Amino acid sequence: SIAATIGNEKYEYPFINAAGVYDETAAQMNEILDSQAGGVTTKSATLVSRPGNPLPRYFNTELGSINSMGLPNQGLDYYLNYIEETNTDKPIDLSISGTSMADNLKALKKVQSSNFNGLTELNLSCPNVIGKPQVGYDYDAIEDTLAAVFEFFTKPLGLKLPPYFDLQQYDAVASILNKYPLTYINAINSVGNGLVVDAETESVVIKPKGGFGGIGGTYIKPVALANVRAFRQRLNPEIKIIGTGGVSTGKDAFELILCGADIVEVGTILAKEGPAVFERLDTELKAIMEAKGYQKLSDFRGKLKEY
Ligand code: DHB
């Protein structure tokens, strides 16, 4: 079996979509649920629907992708209604990404008073809202947010984190997170504010922010592996980890789970291949496990060897 659990949620398959990919509409989320995905994450919701940034705002390259979507979404009520009306055995994880602390608190109060009891993922790492820094890079803002949220929020909560690049950052962030009853973290969001250049046209490839945008895909896999490993070494064992970043094969997922991931999310490769990717990933991961004689993910999860 390749099943996995986070909080009360059971994933028969350990792959789901990363928030923001193939998940803005009910039709897209239904396609993911109908595939061999373990579940689905909603597009990060704001209180009020948003059209997002001007087009073009997403671009695929051979090794990954760049995006500056700007939180296009149908609004929190749409996603809460979708969850309420959808009959599925699979988990639906709700992503929230207000553009201010006040909006995040309002959104989470709405979730708290709703019937939804699944995983809520608070996104502290959107790099693409013009004029807004990523909360995840401001330790005081993380602490203030968690203190305010856990005043009233009693449902299972996860945090989507930006990538960190210095070991001191992991120490600082983990020591804050360990003070709160988080169900999980999700590492990593895109590597923010990269730049892709088209040499032929001598131009950027997306319009918002002069071409700067979040980088995903193969480029960022070592950063994802490092973030999952570094947080697994520092977080309380009760805090689970969703590993996200640069997964395009079952082998990539195997590596993230070795670093400590409980389940794995896919963004860029899902945008490139569509929901059929989930069956391929399940099959590839199972083949690796069979070749190595592993029966379940916990046989190797977190067991990365060091010299
Ligand atoms: C968007 C991008 C992100 O990386 C994120 O975490 C949330 C939103 C976006 O541009 O829509």
Image: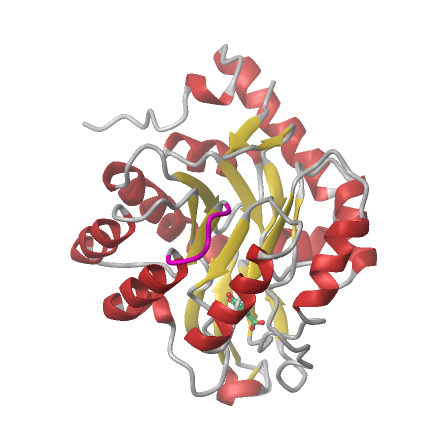
**Residue 55 coordinates in the image, percent (x, y):** 68, 84
Q: Looking at the rendering, in which quadrant would you find the C terminus?
A: top left
Q: Main SS of the magenta segment?
A: loop
Q: Quadrant of ligand 1?
A: bottom right
Instruction: Decide which of 174, 253 is in the foreground and name it.
Output: 174
Q: Is residue 116 magenta?
A: no
Viewport quadrant of the N terminus = top right
Residue 258's place in the image compared with 148, above or below, is above
At 76% from the left and 43% from the top, the residue drawn is: 33
162 is higher (above) or lower (below) than 301: below
Residue 222 image offset from top left, x and y in percent: 37, 49
Q: Which residue is at the front of the view, 82 or 219?
A: 82
Q: Is residue 153 magenta?
A: yes
Q: Residue furthest left?
A: 168
Q: What segment is highlighted magenta in the picture?
A: 151-155
Which residue is nearer to you in this view: 146 or 115? Answer: 115
